Image (cartoon, rainbow, N blue to C red):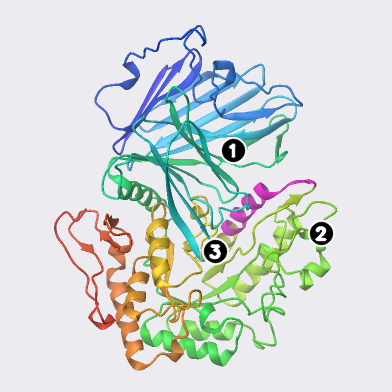
Amino acid sequence: MSERAHLSNGGVDIYFEVVDGALLIRYWGESVIGDPATAPFHRSIPNSDFDEMMNPGVMREQSRGWLGAPTISGHRSGAAWSTKFEVAKLESSKSDIKATLRDARANLELEISGRLDEFGVFRLRYELINGGGDYTLNELTYWLPLSRQANQTLDFVGRWSNERNPQRREIGIGRWLRESHEGRGGHNGTVGEIALTTETNFSGGSAWAVALAWSGDTRYGVEKNYEGTQSIGASELLAPGEVILKKGERYRAPELIATFSNRGLDGLAASYHAHLRARSSHPKSPRPLTLNMWEAIYFDHSQERVAKLVDVAAEIGVERVVLDDGWFGSRRNDRAGLGDWVVSKDIWPTGLRGISDYVTSKGMQFGLWFEGEMVNPDSDLYRNHPDWILSEPGHTPATWRHELVLDLSKPEVYNYVLESVSAVVKEANVKYIKWDHNRILIDAGSNNRPGARAQVVAIYRLFDELKSRHSGLEIESCASGGGRIDLGMADHVDRFWTSDNNDALERQHIQRWTMQFIPPELLGTHVGPTPGHQTGRLLSLPFRAITALFGHAGIEWDITKLDAVELEQLKSWISFYKTKRALLHSGNALRVDYPDANHHLYGVVSGDKKSALLPLPNSALSQLRMHRTCNSAG
């Protein structure tokens, strides 16, 4: 068995070493000349300390002298609470590592696998196997070492319609945590955690980032001990008793996706974007210009009104039309009918196939809104199956937006949602689903146990099954806007609704920072109405259009009320988007550091740096100009 491993790819090095049976990560960061693991490591031992040098390793165990947060926390009816894992196997190549760690006394085994790709992105997975009696797992956390150069953290905070505001702070001694307890990332959640230096900005400086491929509760942390040793980590946040492994059972932790950049925050973003774009599941076709009808008609559905929108959409070059909430059951407002996935005969007496065929005849795709994880108490589904919700015995969770959460871990509930949605998709020739998630998960019990984790696993499986059944189907993840945007959901959907706030001024910062982890072609960016429905603010059409250009562009507006000049401007913008989307959706995001926070200068630069797009001030969309450069714009 090799006692050392060196991964090197994409300008990033990671050094592993086995010392006293423990697996250590000696270094993670910029590629270096020489081997930092061979550098002498001397430390004086004071009178009040361990008598020998301790090497806690990646498991960070008290049994090996670690006094901070451990990697694993759990017990077997009070026993096996303290572990001492030994490396049983270590295999590696230039880009891959596999290790097996065992604790014979605790009867536990941990399988570690990691890959460092050509973009410097490290995907790491832990899988815990229980070899004894029932083992209650409280926590299994990924921790990576941080250079002492890192002295700040950056993550994101917010609320509905105001997501992903950057929060930057100094690293002090102790542990800094960001947790989500909503059963999803949430509007106040952070897609990942970044450590950086004081000097790091968009264009330069060192930055280390971790992001969890998970759509449920998460915990991100940065820890610094009294000696100055620093680490950054992430884990799924488990509820008490949520994971109890029986003999032979496994817990597969959500993957950690980590990277380092010496090219600032734009360098980090470029690595994450390139990594996601290299996936076989990443959308390959040009991202269709989309009209979503929510802010155009809300619940006021009729064949005539929708057809008028379709006619105008086709005239100006829209490629996909999405019918939003209100087409099913008794759903005439947001208080009733959710969960009854049957086309309303009152609104659509002949079904949806007629309007779907009409959309298709105009050369566009037909999309439809669902919120399959939720149910209104005022619905046939809930009246017939009140036991189908996530809840604890003896009390019903408080409603949120007049909704409760269906327990998708129950086979009968999962099958009902899957078959109901699948039937509508087939009958109406739906090519695109906008899937909403408007309610947080609280008191989310299932079979007298916490059920949030199983809910996430179920929705992943449901999305994959829908795509398997309906070839070419695409899914947009919406959660009251940007409440469920993460690298776990990115593997199962084709688009995220970035925010319910279509106000272009607000969207400037929301889109700016969501792109830190997610490439623009996965982010819905729409031209909204004026005044904005969320803010009441009046903004010019050129500004709204330029803002929406830098993403998967679309429209959220009653375009039947536009005059001829506005329609021509929109048509010109749509044409421009179509000619430039190949660059917009493949290039590197460029965010220019500017001394005045009230001004943003940004754009996109091609990978070969031969072309770029940056918005310039203009008074009319018909004169929309983009700066094209052939030099190193980055």
Q: Which residue is mark 1?
A: 252
Height in image: 115 above or below 178?
above
Residue plotted at (50% across, 18% down): 22
**Cα distance, mark 3 to mark 2?**
30 Å
Q: Quadrant of the N terminus?
A: top left
C-beta proximity under 8 Å, tags 2 and 1 = no
Q: Which residue is mark 2?
A: 387
Residue plotted at (55% across, 76% down): 429
Q: Which residue is mark 3?
A: 160
Front-most of residues 462 and 622 = 622
Q: Is residue 281 visible?
A: no
Residue 525: x percent and y percent?
A: 41, 69
Q: Is residue 177 left or right of residue 395?
A: left
Q: Main secondary structure of the magenta part?
A: helix
Height in image: 423 above or below 307?
above
User: Could you classify mark 3 by the number of other residues whose Cα lies within 10 Å: few (under 14), some (14-19), or many (20 or more)?
Assistant: some
Residue 458: x percent and y percent?
A: 64, 53
Q: Amino acid at mark 1?
A: Arg
Q: Provide the residue span drawn in magenta.
A: 448-464
Residue 104: x percent and y percent?
A: 64, 17
